[in-house]
Image (tube, helix red, strand yellow):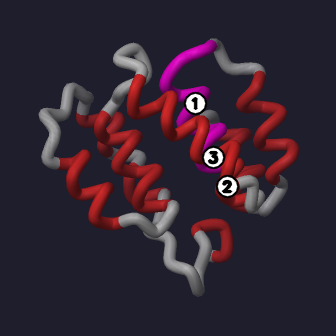
Amino acid sequence: MSTAKNICFFRGQFNKALDLTESFPDGANKTFGQTVIYHAMGRQGESDAAMMQLTNDPGRQVPYLIALVHAMRGEPDQAFEWLDTPLPFSFRQLQTLPYFPPSTSHHPPWSY
C-alpha cells in the first residue's frame, strides 16, 4: 500500500484510499488494497471477491499479504495457515507488518 493510501485508510477516508488503490497497476498490491478497504467499508461481498483473486491467482498469490488480509479481517486461523506457506518476500516487505494491527470485532484496524 502506498503511503498516501495508508494515511487515508487509517484516517477512515476509505473512498479516497480506494480511489488511490484503483490507480495502481493490476497485481497483488492492488488486490490487497481492495480487499482490505472493501472490508473496512463493510462491503464484504467485494472484499471476499478480491480475496478470492488474491488467493486463487498465482500471479497475485503472495502468502504474507494474504495472511495480513486474514489478520485484518479477524481470521487468525487462516492467517497462520498462510504464514506456514514458504514466504518469498524480502525483509523490507516484512517490516510493513507492524503497521497493520490485528482486527477484532470490537476494534477494527482503522480504530487504533
Q: How many marks?
A: 3
Quarter of the view holding residue 44: bottom right
Q: Please name the residue shown 66% across and 67% down the image.
A: 110
Q: Is residue 24 left or right of residue 56?
A: right
Pointers 3 and 2 in contact (C-beta within 8 Å)? yes
Assign the N terminus to one quadrant of the image: top right
Mark 3: which secondary structure?
helix
Other residues around mark 3 within 10 Å, as few (<14) / some (14–19) / many (≥20): many
Q: Is residue 61 left or right of residue 17?
A: left
First in sequence, mark 3 or 1: give its number: 1
Q: Position of residue 59 (x, y in %)?
A: 40, 14
Residue 50 vs 106, above or below: the answer is: above
Which residue type does callout 1 highlight?
Thr
Whole-percent x and y of residue 61? 36, 26
| Real-space Cα separation, disc 3 to disc 2, in angstroms | 5 Å
Amino acid at the residue labelled 2: Gln
Q: Is residue 80 magenta?
A: no
- Identify whether 28 is placed above or below 11: above
Location of mark 3 (residue): 47
According to the picture, the residue beneath numbered tag 2 turns out to be 44
Image location (x, y in percent) of residue 46: 69, 43
* Nearer the camera: disc 3 or disc 1: 3
Sequence-first tag of 1 and 2 = 1
Q: Residue at x 59, y 36 (%)?
A: 50
Q: Is residue 91 left or right of residue 5?
A: left
| Crowding at mark 1 (Cα within 10 Å: few <14, some 14-19, many 20+) | many
Q: Is residue 30 above or below residue 75?
A: above
In the rendered image, the vertical position of residue 58 relative to residue 36, given as above or below: above
According to the picture, the residue beneath numbered tag 1 turns out to be 31
